[in-house]
Image: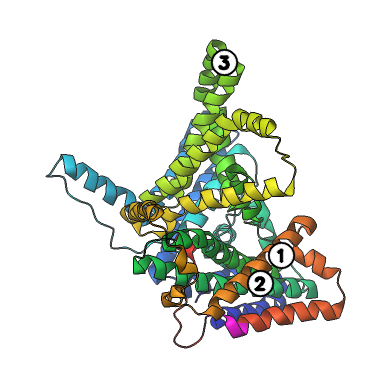
Amino acid sequence: MTVTSFSFFLFLAIGMAFYYAFPRLQWIVLLILSGIFYISAATHYTFAFPVISTGLAYFSTMAYSRYKDDEGKKKVLLILTVLAIIGNVVLWFLLKGSSFWISGSALIRKFIPTFPVLTDLPVVGAMGMAYYTSQVIGYVLDVYWGNTKIQRNFLKLFLFVIFFPQMTVGPISRYEQLSSLFERHSFKYQNLCYGAQRIMWGVFKKIVISDRVGILVDAIWASERTGFYPWIAVLLYPLQIYTDFSGCMDIVIGGAELFDIKLSENFKNPFFSRTSQEFWQRWHITLGTWARDYIYYPVLKSRFLQKIGKRTRDKFGKKVGKLIPWTIGMAVLWFIMGFWHGGIQHIFGVSLWFFAVIVLGELLNPLFCRTNKVLGIHTDSFSWHLFQSVRTYFIYALGAVFFSAPGLHGALAHYKVLISSLTKPNIWIFFDESILEMGVTWVDINIIIFGVVILIIVGVLREKYGFARNWMREQILPFRWFVWLFLLTITLVYGLYGPGYDASIFIYEGF
């Protein structure tokens, strides 16, 4: 069962009927729905993995609840907390991190011929494992730091972990944000409208734009063409992954809204960003805030970095004293961000690439400011903001090659093609209709252009009104109905679905 399938929408409708029919049992209904969804969407035995993950969190936090006021037990409680976190990380690593040990063993074998090349475990990783593992680790740390209440009911804690809308691609929720799971909710027509509208918008982005762009991107790389074609694939891939990831996020947020449950937003017009640092504040927001609160801030506050900051400040001055700890903290943060994505290529495409871009941007910022002043650039002008957003898009597109390519060697091969293509550009491809050999038609190309225009309009409205639907709510009824019926018609007519169509899985579903 995928979240773009008819069976999922039927599942939502039936689930809503039971949910509002039994108000005293709503959280139990959600737990049953989550179990059914998980078992139908994943391999059956993987259901044991979120149970184990929840169990580790439950027993460590219950021990903390019992002995937190006992001074003699503080070290024991710290050890239990650390073990719960390590247990979750090790479980994830064994099931999702095979790229690290396979690549590592191959590298060691080059120097030690007798060293065995390790292979992947013959066990399927759990669906949404990176997302719920992050949630569990956040919950354990919040309990230990005294930032959240302890959930003493194992089944309720388990519902927090496997709440079905967020099992596909997140978002990464905090326990306090999902505490409404255990409250009673009455049926509201507004929730039905908003939820259905959000779902429709997500489906439009996925099956009208993302899957259509994906056909073109995959065909270009498969054709091994040179000239501008590889660059077209690189520049289109961010559009594909954004409409794919954010489209799925719209569907799951809308699905949760039908049950009067508010999930965290994960995107806020990331391609409107003027810098790469701002980009990651708008892209996969819940992962960024999770990494900030549970990795970056604790690292900066650690005694080790505090000592380094003091020594460098005393020796080299206040500016360097701030820069060195910040750089170390950013290095740890971006390594974890790459590690979270589960592949060696992501260490390069996320960790090294964006760490280098952000650190260099910070170091060179004074030079950039002086250059802008000398050239008389009005940094508040629309054209300058547009340039910054295009630049940020291009930087992300180059790093995203590591996502689109099959592994590290595939990504390096793609970069080699991109560099060689610069020496022999072929502008004629924009006029000879050879792009139609890539499995798309002019209708597909026009639909992609139309979709981009719609995305920009909705993005502008969101920047100004918080959400486009806030603006829509102010319009007259006939206009609102026209817009939603038009979007539904476009989705039904031009969406890629139905018999004979093999819908691609969501790109971030693999995490």
For this view, does 201 lie left or right of residue 347?
Answer: right
For the point 58% across and 44% down, which residue is it? 276
Mark 3 residue element:
helix
Pointer 2 local density, CA inside 10 Å: few below 14, some 14–19, many at least 20: many
Residue found 52% across the figure and 28% down from its top: 72
Would residue 296 appear left or right of 121 to someone viewing this image? Answer: right
Establish if 43 lies above or below 319: below
- Residue 445 in sight: yes
Looking at the rendered structure, the kind of residue marked 1 is Val
**What is the CA distance from the residue labelled 3 to the residue labelled 1?**
47 Å
The reply to whether the C-beta atoms of the residues labelled 2 and 1 are less than 8 Å apart is yes
Residue topped by disc 1:
458
Q: Can residue 32 be seen in this view?
A: no
State the image quarter where residue 226 is shown: bottom left
**Residue 457 shown left or right of residue 251 in the figure:** right
Q: Which mark is residue 313?
A: 3
